[in-house]
Amino acid sequence: MATSRSPEIRKDAVHNRWVIFSPARARRPSDFKSKTDAASDANPHTACPFCAGHEHECAPEIFRFPPESTLDWKVRVIQNLYPALSRDLDPPDVQCGGAQLAVAGFGFHDVVIESPAHPIHLNHLSPPQIADVLLAYKKRIDQLRGFDSIKYVQVFKNHGATAGASMSHSHSQILALPIIPPAASARIQSMKEHFEQTGECAICQVKQQDLLIHESNHFKSIVPFAATFPFEIWIIPRRHSSHFHDLDREMADDLGGVLKLMLVKMCVQLQNPPYNMMVHSAPLGAESTQLPFSHWFIQIVPQLTVVGGFELGTGCYINPVLPEDAAKVLREVSVQD
Ligand code: AMP
Ligand code: ZN
Ligand code: ZN
């Protein structure tokens, strides 16, 4: 373990990849700030298709919370107007083939509008309101699980233009795929190998106190031992669970508070950075009892660095901030209620 400022190469057991920690390349961890303020475009007078009253400018709605609400809705799940995959195609029969295998782009691409009001971002919502967003993810995943041809569901959020967002109104997306994407299959394979070698789930095994940011009834928030990115945060269920859709109301309420706390801490410490949030769950189809090695978690990545030629060429990332330093800074940053 690195005690000095000399570089160290750490193995990420969840993703089976190496990360180079190079503290000499960094400013002090406490000096990290985002160059762009991702909340700066939230003009309270701006309106967009995701605002309440503009529902007719959106692609069709799938459901809303509360179900019978009108203009007073809290969360809406809608079809994406420009979907990456089409729900109207026949599900493909995906089999291994030659070097140029191609199948029809069947799948579902939905948008979750997290708030009816344009300037309100996810970190501004109350914990029960964030819990509603999380339960909207769960409800939509439960619907998508009904399609045999859907193998994996990716929930993700882009916040701020440099994190890939094209809409500033608070939203996340759900993409349901007829294949298991490479990052998910590599993660599952890596966690399986770890389990076979050690008899333990790689995420249940995380016990290092110096990586801990916060603990609640059901969740631990940490900076992972081999974090790929500076100030990356993982929120992990304390009890082993393979699928995000196993979340119940009590856990969602707890997670709503934890997610808010992590987003607010990140915004205070790093000056409203653009960020991505991803829910990493197990592929559909297998029951939780069959997956003692696969543990779902939420990953939050503030966009503070750019991916360059070294990363693209090697798949190996250089992180200038040691995870235990980032965890200490995030643990200690105080937020007002
Ligand atoms: P992002 O690009 O990450 O900000 O995600 C916004 C998503 O909303 C994009 O994938 C757009 O295709 C989608 N989108 C934009 N306008 C609409 C609309 N009026 N109705 C439904 N989806 C939309
Ligand atoms: Zn809006
Ligand atoms: Zn576990």
Image (tube, rainbow, N blue to C red):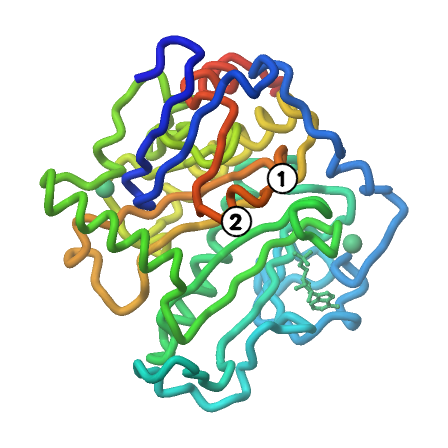
Callout 1, which amino acid?
Val
Element type where label 1 sits in the image: loop
- The one of 312 and 108 positioned closer to us in this rendering: 312
Query: For mark 1, does the 10 Å Cα neighbourhood hold few (<14), some (14 to 19), or many (20 or more) residues?
Result: few
> In this image, 190 relative to 175: left or right?
left
**Depth check: 230 or 107 in front?**
230
Q: Amino acid at mark 2?
A: Leu
Q: Is residue 38 left or right of residue 217?
A: right
Give the quadrant of the N terminus. Answer: top left
Using a 10 Å C-alpha cutoff, classify the residue at mark 2 as few (fewer than 14 neighbours), some (14 to 19) or many (20 or more). Answer: few
143 is higher (above) or lower (below) than 301: below
Q: Which mark is residue 306?
A: 1
Mark in the foreground, 2 or 1: 2
Q: To which residue does mark 2 refer?
A: 312
Q: Position of residue 9 (x, y in %)?
A: 36, 28
Q: Residue at x 51, y 89 (%)?
A: 89
Q: Quadrant of ligand 2?
A: bottom right
For image coordinates 31% across by 66% down, the residue present is: 284
Say above or below: 295 vs 302: below
Depth order, front residue of 263/34: 34
Report the residue at 69% width, 26% height from top: 271
Quadrant housing residue 335: top right
- Of pointers 2 and 1, the one earlier in the residue sequence: 1
